Amino acid sequence: MSDGSLPDWSFVRQARRRAFWRRPWVRATLILAALGLTASLLGQAVWHWRDTLAARYPESRPGLQVFCEVLGCTIAPPRRPQDVVIEGSVLLRRAPDRYSFHLVVRNHADIEIAAPALELTLTDAQDRVLVRRVWLPAEWPQPRATLAPGQEWPLQFELAFDHPKAARMAGYRAVLFYP
């Protein structure tokens, strides 16, 4: 203490710490850091939900397009696998090697969503895969890119299955997914 400084007691250290955090440049730095982190979080949220925001709030699309031009992203119809379902399907044998596959796809979302892809798997009596085929929405009989809110999409595929295993076909599975 011969140098004229205050002793290093706990209440003195505590007073110095409080004085440090009250300095204007420290407060300004903290405020700028908080604003920067908040803007970063908001930007990440907009990036992640840009498709849903554009579908739910069409008036936000111009601003989102500017955002995507700057960051190099695109705005597309949202993909919501939990909201697009097969309401019913049936596979009918029309001839020894010809089948008709009928299904109804429904969008249960309250916004327009991207049309999904379809995977059809034909199986034998032991549920082993005989053949599997995937159709993208553009390859479907009535191609479309989106499904409107609550919209039903009835489809019919005509299939030829002239494989030696065709006689063993006993079942099928149909799955909607987004590639």
Image (cartoon, rainbow, N blue to C red):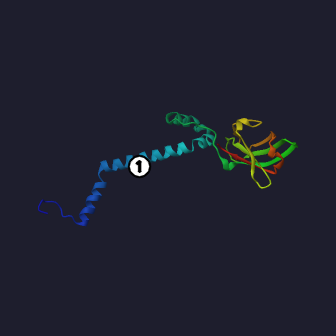
Q: Residue furthest front?
A: 164
Q: Indicate whether 174 appears above or below 17.
A: above
Task: For residue 99, say whether it is visible.
Answer: yes
**From the viewer's perspective, is 38 left or right of 131?**
left
Q: Residue furthest left?
A: 2
Q: Quadrant of residue 178?
A: top right
Q: Indicate whether 15 appears above or below 140.
A: below
Locate the N terminus by quadrant: bottom left
- Label 1 sits on a secondary structure element that is helix
Locate the C terminus by quadrant: top right
**From the viewer's perspective, is 54 left or right of 161?**
left
- Is 104 in front, or is 26? 104
Q: Quadrant of residue 98?
A: top right
Decide: few, some or many residues near mark 1? Use Cα within 10 Å; few <14, some 14-19, many ≥20.
few
Q: Residue at x 25, y 65 (%)?
A: 11
Q: Position of residue 112 (x, y in %)?
A: 68, 41
Report the label total. Answer: 1
**From the viewer's perspective, is 26 left or right of 63?**
left
Q: Amino acid at mark 1?
A: Ala
Q: Residue at x 30, y 48 (%)?
A: 25
Q: Residue at x 42, y 45 (%)?
A: 36
- Is 129 in front, or is 110? 129
Q: Position of residue 152 (x, y in %)?
A: 76, 43
Q: Quadrant of residue 162?
A: top right
Q: Position of residue 16 (x, y in %)?
A: 25, 59
Task: For residue 158, say whether it is visible.
Answer: no
Residue named by callout 1: 34
Q: Position of residue 133 (x, y in %)?
A: 73, 42
